[in-house]
Every structure is written in structure tokens, then in C-alpha cells.
């Protein structure tokens, strides 16, 4: 595979509120299949209906897989290289967000993406997403939301360069930049062209 063929690369930030934000500006809402079926599941469990419990679990899995499949297909059909953040489900599932983490299925999504990338000749790489939320993707200052109080911030304006960011799309742009930096280090002949910045967020899952 030739590394020079990556001007059409993209970054993807996986999260809980939105399942994914893409550096092209697309925001894909979390589907919460598990949460939606939670009541039915509890009823079946209390009634001791093991087959019903199994069937509900299978349905949740199938829907999540289908959702992952659709998004992965769209990504590998649109881009030559995809960089995805290494968000760690294990660390987050220790917190109060365990159910959402369960619902997201990040590692299953990434595994499928890697597999699909390999099959279609699209470069897929997991990159370290440290500071991707805090860093402004335009001027690289760390002016973004941080810590506990920054958790709920969905949109913010950089105090240095005055750019307004969608939290997760900005993170996706930083993931893309980190992926490109890595490619540069591995292959100095790569073009140093930057993608035009995406503006705002658009829900493509409607
Ligand atoms: Zn800035």
C-alpha cells in the first residue's frame, strides 16, 4: 500500500453523547440500544424468562452491529485513511457511565473498521487521543474544555484564535492531525497538506 495516497484522510472521535464525530463535520448520535431495551429486559429477567432475555440480548447485539456496519461502510467508502481515537472502554466503565459504555461498543466498532479497512484497501489506524478535546484544532492552544466542569461543554470558542468548535468534531480534527503526524514520522515523503476544516456538526443518522 502506498502511503502517498492519503490526502483523503479523516479522523473519528468515539464518544458517549455522540457515538462518533468525524473531522469532516458529521456527528453521529449514540443509539443507546441497550438503554432502550432495559425495561423489557428487566421484566423478562424478573419473570425468569430465560429465552426472552436471550432473545432481547441478541436483538440489541444485532442492532448495534448493524449500526456499526453502516457507519464503517460509509467511512471506508468515503476515505482513503481513517484515524480513530483510542478511547478506552475499560477505564470509563469504572465510572457511572458504564451503561452508555456498554451501549457504544467501541472496541467492536474499531475491530470491524480495521477488518473492513483491510478488505477494501483503506488505511485504518488507532491513534492516541490524549488532549484531543482540550486542544484547539486550528491554533493548537489548549484552550478547550477540561476536567470535571468541562464535561458538559458541547461547544466552545478558543480564547486564542476565536474559533468556535463543536467539542467532538474538534477532537476528531485533532485525531486526524495526530494520525497524519504519525504518518509523517513513518514516511517523511508524505505530503504536508491539511484538510480544509469542517464547520459545525451535522447529524447524518436521520
Ligand atoms: Zn484556537
Image (spheres, rainbow, N blue to C red):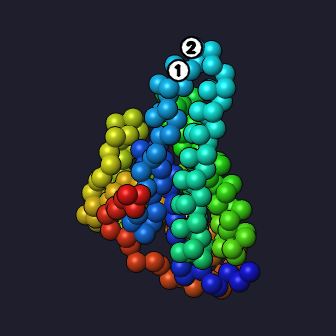
Residue beneath the point at 65% across and 64% down: 125
Q: Is residue 41 above or below residue 205?
A: above
- Residue 8 is tagged as none
User: Residue 65 in the image: x percent, y percent?
Assistant: 61, 50
State if disc 2 and disc 1 touch (CB < 8 Å): yes
Residue 192, above or below 13: below
The one of 89 and 72 positioned closer to us in this rendering: 72
Q: Secondary structure at mark 2?
A: helix
Residue marked by disc 2: 46
Report which quarter residue 68 is drawn in: bottom right
Q: Residues within 10 Å of mark 1 (few under 14, many from 20)?
A: few
> On the image, numbered disc 1 is attached to which residue?
42
Structural distance between the alpha carbons of marks 1 and 2: 6 Å
Q: Is residue 101 visible?
A: no
Query: How far from the left and from the top, in percent, is residue 63?
Result: 56, 46
Q: The C terminus is located in which quarter?
A: bottom left
Amino acid at each position: 500500500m502506498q502511503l502517498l495516497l492519503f490526502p483523503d484522510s479523516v479522523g473519528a472521535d468515539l464518544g458517549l453523547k455522540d457515538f462518533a464525530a468525524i473531522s469532516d463535520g458529521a456527528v453521529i448520535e449514540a443509539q443507546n440500544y441497550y438503554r432502550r431495551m432495559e425495561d423489557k429486559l428487566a421484566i423478562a429477567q424478573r419473570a425468569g424468562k430465560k429465552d426472552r432475555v436471550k432473545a432481547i440480548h441478541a436483538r440489541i447485539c444485532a442492532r448495534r452491529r448493524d449500526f456499526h456496519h453502516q457507519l464503517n461502510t460509509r467511512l471506508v467508502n468515503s476515505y482513503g485513511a481513517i484515524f480513530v481515537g483510542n478511547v478506552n472502554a475499560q477505564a470509563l466503565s469504572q465510572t457511572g457511565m458504564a451503561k452508555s459504555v456498554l451501549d457504544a461498543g467501541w472496541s467492536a466498532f474499531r475491530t470491524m473498521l480495521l477488518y473492513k479497512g483491510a478488505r477494501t484497501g483503506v488505511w485504518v489506524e488507532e491513534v492516541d487521543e490524549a488532549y484531543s478535546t482540550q486542544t484547539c484544532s486550528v491554533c493548537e492552544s489548549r484552550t478547550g474544555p477540561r476536567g470535571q466542569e468541562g464535561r458538559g461543554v458541547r461547544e466552545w470558542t478558543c480564547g486564542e484564535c476565536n474559533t468556535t468548535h463543536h467539542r467532538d468534531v474538534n477532537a476528531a480534527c485533532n485525531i486526524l492531525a495526530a494520525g497524519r503526524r504519525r504518518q509523517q514520522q513513518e514516511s517523511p515523503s508524505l505530503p504536508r497538506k491539511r484538510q480544509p476544516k469542517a464547520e459545525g456538526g451535522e447529524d447524518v443518522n436521520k
